[in-house]
Amino acid sequence: MTAERCGHVAILGAPNAGKSTLVNTLVGAKVSIVTHKVQTTRGRVTGICNVGRTQIVLVDTPGIFQPRKRLERALVKTAWSGAVDADVTLLMIDARRGLDSAATSILSRLTRHRHVLCAINKIDLVSRDALLPLAGCIGRHEVVEEIFYISALNGDGVDDIVTALAERLPVQPWLFPADHLSDQPLARLAAEITREKLFVRVHQELPYELSVETELWTDIPEENAVRIDQVIYVARRGHKPIVLGRNGSTIREVGKAARRELETLLECKVHLFLHVKVRTGWLDDPARYREIGLEFPG
């Protein structure tokens, strides 16, 4: 019998390169939220992909970019720290943007990382004629061991990545039971799902100044149900009416969308109660950063 393999794979890339989509595709379930907005992922999110005798522990990281604000600096710091000790680093590049300044900057910092692979993502959105020249530009950096052409959304080329990752992981026992999909507590994942729905619904800038916390989780066995109480924290008083919407319309729609997804995830009825509170100055509070899995930058 072949030996068990297990190891960490850090997935890096610029914002919206498709990192979270790939993690969800590989895991086969939603463990990381996805929106069209940049910097959706905040803390490191671990997804677990088991293939044969190999367990691939996927570390989804925030998108790497040139930070300006404190929260942005924390996101970028978290992304890089998630890759430091990884057995394999997978760089995601958006085929539409190519090897732009953001991707080039990331590549230049990967020279000391073990086993760097590259996935050119969203190949279904570009001409095939553009892919070989892009791969040539990536290869000239002499950092990447292997390049893959994929669509994380529809799964094209993803199996080849799984095979390549499994081959490079060390021989050692699995870190998680076979039925685990993530190391995230369900309460945090539930909060993230609500935050995803807020990102989609509210003002362009507002999502980056709000957070969601699950305050209470109550199982109701006799109903095969769960009650989840969450608080949406906003940084300014003027943001609260935006989240609530006219006559509560926005928060109702957010709650409805989050509840539907949570019922699919938990396979039971969900009673979701959302409350909005103002937490001024949370963007400068180290405790709040720790709660969402970020290191507080000085």
Image (cartoon, rainbow, N blue to C red):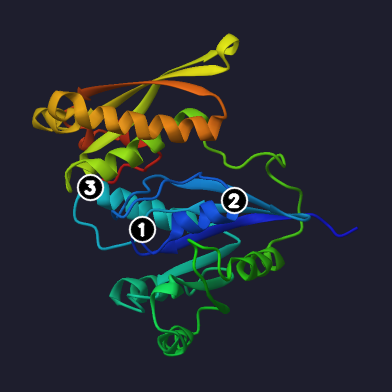
For the residue marked with disc 3, what is the amino acid? Arg
| Residue picked out by circle 1 | 63
Q: Residue at x 69, y 39 (%)?
A: 179
The answer to whether residue 173 shows anywhere in this view is yes
Q: Which mark is residue 237?
A: none
Label 2 vs 1, first from the N-terminus:
2
Q: Residue at x 52, y 68 (%)?
A: 113
Secondary element at tag 2 = helix
Label 2 vs 3, first from the N-terminus:
2
- Return the x and y of residue 90 as percentages of the image width and height: 52, 66
Question: In the rendered view of the protein, which quadrant contains the C terminus?
Answer: top left
Task: Using the image, determine if residue 269 lies above or below residue 107.
Answer: above
What distance separates the C-alpha of mark 2 from that of mark 1? 20 Å
Task: Using the image, determine if residue 20 lies above or below residue 266.
Answer: below
- Return the x and y of residue 41 as percentages of the image width and height: 38, 48
Question: Would you say the residues marked 2 and 1 are in contact, meaning their CB atoms lie under 8 Å apart?
Answer: no
Please tell me whether mark 2 or mark 3 is closer to you in this view: 2
Secondary element at tag 3 = helix
| Residue picked out by circle 3 | 70
Depth order, front residue of 284/162: 162
Task: Using the image, determine if residue 76 lies above or below residue 274.
Answer: below
- Return the x and y of residue 239 as percentages of the image width and height: 13, 33
Depth order, front residue of 191/68: 191
- 51 left or right, relative to 14: right
| Residue picked out by circle 2 | 27
- 297 left or right, relative to 170: left
For the residue marked with disc 2, what is the amino acid? Val
